[in-house]
Image (spheres, coloured by chain):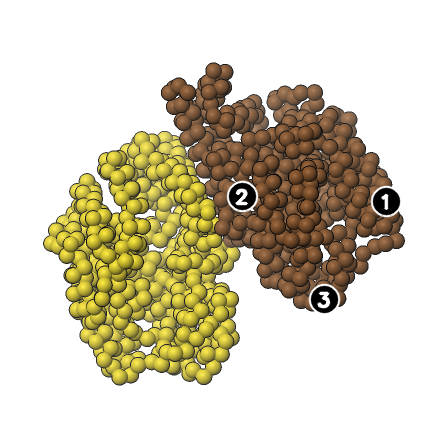
Chain colours: A brown, B yellow
Amino acid sequence: MTDRVQKLETDFRQYVKKIEDYGQALALLAWDSRTGAPKKGVNQRSEVIGTLSSEVFSLSTSAQMGDFLNKLREEAVYAKLTDITRKTVDECYKNFERNVKIPKEEHKEYVMLQSQSESLWEEAKNKADFELFKPNLKKLVEFKKRFVRYWGYDHHPYNTLLDDYEPGVFVDTIDKVFGELRDQLIPLVKGVTESPHQPKTDFLYEKFPRANQQALSIDILKEIGYDFEAGRLDETVHPFAIGINPNDVRVTTKYNENDFRVALFGTIHEGGHALYEQNIAQDLIGTPLASGTSMGIHESQSLFWEKFVGKNYGFWERNYDLLKKHATGQFDHVSLDNFYFAVNQAKQSLIRIESDELTYCLHIILRYELEKALMEDRITVDELPEIWNEKMEEYVGIRPQHDGEGVLQDVHWSFGAFGYFPSYALGYIYSAQIKEAMLKDLPNFDQLVREGEYGSIRQWLTKKVHQHGKMKKPAEIIKDITGGGIDSKPLVRYLDEKYRRLYKF
Amino acid sequence: MTDRVQKLETDFRQYVKKIEDYGQALALLAWDSRTGAPKKGVNQRSEVIGTLSSEVFSLSTSAQMGDFLNKLREEAVYAKLTDITRKTVDECYKNFERNVKIPKEEHKEYVMLQSQSESLWEEAKNKADFELFKPNLKKLVEFKKRFVRYWGYDHHPYNTLLDDYEPGVFVDTIDKVFGELRDQLIPLVKGVTESPHQPKTDFLYEKFPRANQQALSIDILKEIGYDFEAGRLDETVHPFAIGINPNDVRVTTKYNENDFRVALFGTIHEGGHALYEQNIAQDLIGTPLASGTSMGIHESQSLFWEKFVGKNYGFWERNYDLLKKHATGQFDHVSLDNFYFAVNQAKQSLIRIESDELTYCLHIILRYELEKALMEDRITVDELPEIWNEKMEEYVGIRPQHDGEGVLQDVHWSFGAFGYFPSYALGYIYSAQIKEAMLKDLPNFDQLVREGEYGSIRQWLTKKVHQHGKMKKPAEIIKDITGGGIDSKPLVRYLDEKYRRLYKF
């Protein structure tokens, strides 16, 4: 490497590190705001976040950044960079292009619309009044269409939106896998619903004191190998995991004393996200590559631990006594088999975040179809509530009584996050693909779980997924693991076997 | 106000607000680092703090700041500014002058020496080996002397050091009040030590479970009027209170299960600091004026609540039952009078942070005398241990067996904080002056405490001290409250009356 290139690389990495350091401060501010920050400090907190965010935006779109990118992307220079710097250049360039293509004034207008829309959405949802939210939703859709025109797109405008959350995954692939999945899931849901064999579940709702649930959550996180020296567990309203950096990855949960599953499986889920972030390679720190590669791959990790470990029969052979130890007697006369059936109950729900693993993807497919149709101008915002309700009845078998439990239920559109939803279902699909591939290397998977030997499972995931951070794109990760592309069949096989077995149909 | 001045003022305030926003992010990072931040994240955390701190330093010493200050300090302009902007200019100017007068290279060398010295000091203290720390301490003293030459001084070089912690308070005043105080305290300590009338204290050391102490701490903070909607309570190793801004002021404490006094009186102490910060005027937010005016005045507020409220007989008439409710029976057969005597026990200690209110100031006076003598070149670093031990024996009546419990006990010098110690004793002196002055307006003070009517006490303190933040200098606050200057007589009167009464001599 020539001295000139080396100097350029060092300066660029220094510049990027500053942005990343600000990003870590912002991550802590976000964590704090959502865990225990005092109420009266909210306004001041927003000011601080605003100041730091603008600084990050300025640094990411500055003339200096443009100059760095021009020089580093010259073919002869680019070829001489280290892998990490090259991927960093790619990430910064993508971000730079996105941001400089939107006229400043329009971006400002959009940001104002976003912040105004979130509270308006909340009001509309509570009142089940779509008309209240509609004008803003229309504007948000128009903005996103316009932005896509500024950014440009390949084949389909929705591809550009997907690129924010699931880079390298396109509409044609999603159409195919979601279509197959939908057609397989609908009869399965019907089978479960109509089965006379249903679990007894009353003991799920008996009181489980908050402090006991907290102790259980800590034990379970330790059980799956979450490193408390590189993280902590706190309480919040809407649980999340956040990687400030791979050495500081925090989990949050919430405790419902009348339904311990919320905290228990929620903690395992967030713990799965956290294991991903904790195991990212240390040499990516200080670059934008030191976090999960996409929403979908992230979700595959949380779901892997929640579904394939936390809802595994062997997991409860091993941990049912631990649960009983923390509980106050409600499981003493419940057999392991009954307990296992109950926590794997499938039950239709109108609400996505309350739905089971069997119908979850149908909720997502519905949203994907609507978003895509909006972007193609095949439907209008006015038609959304009616189409939503029809699809819900067709896919899940139940119909919302009002828009609060229908089209208004999710926050995402209120901040313009079109293209986000597919990641959730992709996460389900990926997780089952990953599980099938893992079985080839670890055929004794069930035994490992039963014996609490998660070490080799974590190592496998670290090697194939975690360590890479954003060095690999989602499709690349799936390709290297499975030898092929995104495929819904492993998920269908898993759900089909499990629910026919449990519900005997 | 002319348009030009108005524009200048707005731009300057905007610029300062950015520095303050960064400062608030830094405050949160500091709080987090000292409460629950994961161990493995320490290095990354230092990087983030380093990046933000350098940015604050750059902004505070930039050519742009210099330009702002030049223009704003022009007589005609300065006269037209609002009070808040004028004081902000003064603060920024002081800081600017301090920082630009030190050659960059020397400053860097000094910062490196500081960070190296703190761990070296820790090792030396643990090994009770002064020789190990001596070379660094010599360098630190030399740096400080040189810095004082760069900064310049009035009358005495130590005045410039005092200016960092207690602006507007000078060596001649301190010599006078400390001298008087020392001469009054020594015989009092002797009287207490020789008195045959000593408290029974065994019940102080019975087990008081951590969770119960936590609940007690929360109740006591609420009792004195700490606003939990603008703060929170956490656990830490070295307790502190931190004002991120007046709407977010956090308290920390530590729980010793074998000595509940640590958490109880520690929490009241930190709560006193927090009440100060919570009651600073909201319109100072976004300027460097939105915090306590000096270390000494801050300490006067924590000591006021700890000593004049928390160790008041009436406070325990009111709260002894609350304490018993949280405890596990150890006080059931202890009369209120015995309890009160025990928590007000005076007992000589070699260690400043473990010493009682009677000897505390003597520990400080000793340090002040040594620091001043060092700055005057009247003594050398080599002589410190011996002089320390002699003075300790003379003032407190006991002699350290090794330097770990003598000259090496405090961290302050290891980061060059010469001139800091006097603030602690000034805090004691101020608090007693404030208490005497308050009695003129609230002659029923003891009754108010006994009845838990702290509202008028807090209002009085807010009006006279808290609301002003840094708008008033310490001496100005004391002048406006007492009509005079710093005076040790109220403290002596308080201690004399109390300890002669308790120890019957």
Residue placed at 34% from the left, 35% from the top? Answer: B58
> Same subunit under labels 3 and 2?
yes
- Mark linked to residue A332: 3
Residue placed at 23% from the left, 52% from the top? Answer: B132
Q: Which residue is mark 1?
A: A190
Q: Nearer the viewer, mark 1 or mark 2?
A: 2
Residue B504 drawn at (x, y percent): 27, 83
Of labels 3 and 2, earlier in sequence is 2
Residue B233 drawn at (x, y percent): 47, 59
Amino acid type at circle 1 is Lys
Amino acid type at circle 3 is Asp
Q: Nearer the viewer, mark 3 or mark 1?
A: 3
Answer few, some or many: residues within 10 Å of disc 2's Cα (few below 14, many 20 plus, some between 14 and 19). Answer: many
Quarter residue B25 falls in: top left
Amino acid type at circle 2 is Gln
Of labels 3 and 1, earlier in sequence is 1
Above or below residue B439? Residue A444 is above
Above or below residue B160? Residue B383 is below
Which is more toward the observer, B309 or A338?
A: A338
Q: Secondary structure at mark 1?
A: helix
Q: Which residue is mark 2?
A: A278
Q: CA distance from mark 3 to mark 1?
A: 33 Å
